Amino acid sequence: MKPFKLVINGSLVETSEYFDVLNPADKSVVARCPKATEADLNNAVAAANTAFESWSALDISERRELLLKLADVVEDKAEEFKTLLTKEQGKPLQGFANLGAGFEFEGTLNWIRTTANFDIKPKIIEDNDTVRIELHRKPLGVVGSITPWNYPLLISIWHIIPALLAGNTVVMKPSEMTPLTMLRFGEVAQEILPPGVLNIVTGAGELGALISSHEDIQKIVFTGSTPTGKAIMKSASGNLKRLTLELGGNDAGIVLDDVNVDDIAEKIFASAFINNGQTCAALKRLYVHESVYDEMCNALTKIATSMKNGNGMDKDTDLGPLQNEQQLNIVKELAEDAKQRGATFLCGGEVVDEKGYFYPPTLVSNIEDGAKLVDIEQFGPILPIIKFHDVEDAIASANRLGVGLGGSVWSQDLIKAQRVASRMQCGTVWINSHAAVLPIAPFGGVKDSGFGVEFGEEGLNEYTSVHTIHIYK
Ligand code: NDP
C-alpha cells in the first residue's frame, strides 16, 4: 500500500515516520499517513509566507476563477473522494435520507462555488466636500486551519476557501483520525493553485500546538472541542493571532404542543442522527411538550428501529460506525449513567457489533436535566427526550448549559415559535428545522461554543483586517 504524502510548496513530501489510518467499520488499515516534523511544518509555513505576496496581489476575480476551477477538478474525482471519505470516516456512501458521503461531497462543491462567488468591496463611510473615508479589507497572511474528523472534507473547505478567496495562504492540519481525504484534496489542488498557497501537514500529539504558537501564522481557524479551543487561545497569544473557534455545543430542540408529530418526526430524527450524531450543530437534547410526548417517542422509535447499521460501503447501510473508539466510549459512558438513573431505553443502548466502532441508534425517555446524557455533548447516535409541562421551563433548560451553538423550536404557530426562538442563547436558531447550515448564512457559537462566525459575508470578513483610509480633499 503506497503511503500518502504531505503537500508542501506544491510538492508531495515524504516523511521518515508514518502512522496507520483505520477504517472504523472493521479497524483495518486504510492507508499509512505521513507524520510531519516541526521542520516540515516550518517549511510549509515558509512556503505559505512566500506565496502570500503574489497570491494576495492577484485580483479577487483571479483567485475566484482558480477556486472555481478547483471545484471542477475535484468534482471529476467524485467517486474517489466519496469512497476515501467512507473508508476513513465511516459514514455511508449514501446513508439514510442521503446524508452520507455523497451529501458531504456535494456540500463541499456547493460551498466552494458559493463562497468563491462572494466579493470583498471597499465601503465608503463618508464622502462630503472635505473628506472621503473608505474602508478596505486586507488579507491577514498565513492562516492555520485545524479540522476535525466528523466532516473531514466539508469543514476543511469551510476554513480554506474563504481564507484563500480573501487573499491569504493556508497551512492546514486535518485530524489524524481522518487525514487522507484532505491529503488527496491538497494533492489535486496543486494542479490549479500556485505552489505554497495551500499546504497540508498531518501528524498527532504536538503538531497542533506548534501551529497555534507559530510566529509566522497570523490566524487560526479551529473546529473541535472547547478544552482544545481554550488551549489554542493560550498558545496563539504570542503574536496575538486572530481566532475563529467553532467548538460544538449541546443543541436543544423544543417541541411545542401544537405540532403534527407525523409531519416532523423524520426531520427531527435526521437533525439528531445526521452523521451518526457526530455533527457540531446536531439536535442533542429534545424537549417535548407533555401533550405530544408519547406520540413523539413512538414516532421516533419507529424510525430508529428501521435503521440499518453497517459498513458504509454497503449500499443499504443507513448509519455507519462511530468514527473512533474514544467517541464510542463517551457514548457508552453516557448511556450507562442514564441506565443507572432508571431512564427508559426506547431502542438501542447495547453494542451488538464489535468488529467496528458501532453503536445502534438509541432513544432515551424518562430522563431529566442533570443526567450526563442531557448535560454532556454525546456527539453520537443517542438522543435524550425530555418531557416538559411549561414552555418557560423548556427555555430555561435549553439555556442552562455553558454552551450555545444552535437550537430549534418546532411549532405550527410561527409567531409563537419565533418568540421562543428569540430567547434561546445560541448562535443559530432554526424554526421547524435543525442543523441546516448554508454557505450564505453566518454560523457560530456563543458562550463556550466559541466565537467568530463562518459563512456569508461576515464569515469571509474574518479572514481580513480593516484598512481605513481618510482622504482630506
Ligand atoms: P479536539 O477538539 O481535542 O481536537 C483535536 C485536534 O486539535 C488535533 O488536530 C490536535 O492536533 C489539535 N490540538 C490539540 N491541542 C492543540 C493546541 N494547543 N493548539 C492547536 N491545535 C491543538 O478533538 P477530539 O478528536 O479529541 O474530540 C474531542 C471532542 O470534541 C469530541 O468528543 C466531540 O465532543 C468534540 N468535537 C467537536 C467537533 C465539532 O464539529 N465542533 C468535531 C469533532 C469533535 P495535535 O494532536 O497534533 O496537537
Image: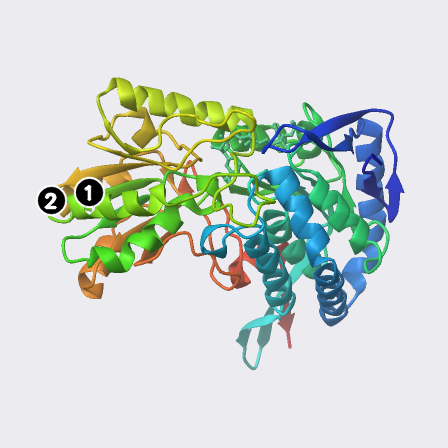
Q: Nearer the viewer, residue 234 or 221?
A: 221
- As drawn, the residue found furthest toward the top would be 340
Which label sits on residue 177? none
Horizontal side of 190 relative to 380 (left or right) equals right
Q: Amino acid at mark 1?
A: Ala
Residue 50 in view: yes
The image quarter containing residue 261 is bottom left
Residue 148 in view: no
Q: How is the image coloured?
A: rainbow
Q: Quadrant of ligand 1?
A: top right
Which label sits on residue 394? 1
The image quarter containing residue 364 is top left
Tell me if residue 168 comes above or below residue 64 in the rendering: above
Horizontal side of 317 relative to 52 (left or right) equals left
The image quadrant where one finds the N terminus is: top right
Q: Please give the name of the residue rendered at 82% of the width and 43% of the height, measured from the top-left corner.
A: 7
The residue that label 2 is drawn on is: 390
C-alpha span from label 1 to label 2: 7 Å
Q: Nearer the viewer, residue 473 or 221?
A: 221
Q: Please give the name of the residue rendered at 43% of the width and 56% of the height, measured from the top-left corner.
A: 436
Tell me if residue 73 comes above or below residue 218 in the rendering: below
Tell me if residue 433 comes above or below residue 401 in the rendering: below
Element class at badge 2 = loop
Element class at badge 1 = helix
